[in-house]
Amino acid sequence: MSNGKIALVTGGGTGVGKAIAEALLEDGYSVAITGRRREVLDAAFGEWREHRDRVLAVVADISVPADVERLFAEVTGRFGRLDLLVNNAGMSAPAVHIEDVPFETWNAVVGANLTGAFLCMQAAFRQMKAQSPQGGRIINNGSISATTPRPRSAPYTATKHAITGLTKSAALDGRAFNIACGQIDIGNASTEMTRAMATGVLQADGSTAIEPTIDAGIVAKAVVHMASLPLEANVLTMTVMASGMPFVGRG
């Protein structure tokens, strides 16, 4: 059953993004997903056949302005408006010392994690300001790296810290237009990106340790909750993490 609301989830074909898209579909949203790989989007679309009239899959590289313009044109052309943007797409990089990070890797991570989120937020602001009724909500995937880095993670950590500033700036700029912007900081959701945690990941003291994870569906439920609030209310930041992971305090 449709609730009449339209959502766009970047990086929506796999991992946390896919879980969020599924949860939004179950909550009645019409959902557009985007990513760079057609086969991944097609596979996700194939799993949601019962919702096919409420699903749109668009191949796009959100770090490219022309792709973002085309993406939003396809979403609004199909559904007429946009009520929710979930900026989930992103990438990590190999854990290397900061002096050994290749410039190409830095640019790729900044493009996927920060520039892409910025371009999508620009497009969402334009649409949400212009539509009637005016307004909407943006939820950015910050990661707990938005506050606390892992060792040897300069590109990823820098972009996620920047997402926090982008979120706060957009939350302020959106007030006059009924646009709410918040951030979800995720710790150890079980995806392809976190598979290494089952065998051990580098710790701040130089040791390697296995870390607990949580199902991505738990994160998706939190996003649906954030999205369910009326636009006069906003969850500016929320942290959802595996309770036993080494994050709080000293480990």
Image (cartoon, rainbow, N blue to C red):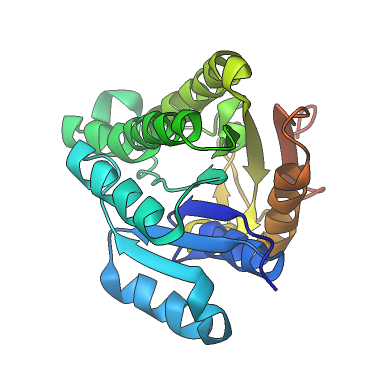
Q: Where in the figure is residue 238, as x and y percent of width and height? A: 73, 35
User: Viewer-proximal residue, 159 or 121?
Assistant: 121
Image quarter (top left, top right, bottom left or bottom right) of the N terminus: bottom right
User: Viewer-proximal residue, 178 or 14?
Assistant: 178
Q: Can residue 209 be seen?
A: yes
Q: In the picture shown, does residue 107 fall above or below 42?
A: above
Say left or right for 27 vs 102.
Answer: right
Q: Where in the figure is residue 56, as x and y percent of width and height? A: 41, 67
- Residue found at x 39% / y 61%: 78
Q: Where in the figure is residue 3, as x and y percent of width and height? A: 69, 61
- Residue found at x 55% / y 54%: 6
Say left or right for 184 vs 44.
Answer: right
- Residue found at x 68% / y 66%: 28
Q: Quadrant of residue 168?
A: top right
- Residue found at x 76% / y 47%: 228
Q: In the picture shown, does residue 172 fall above or below 105?
A: above
Say left or right for 120 vs 65.
Answer: right
User: Viewer-proximal residue, 159 or 126?
Assistant: 126
Q: In the picture shown, does residue 180 fall above or below 51?
A: above
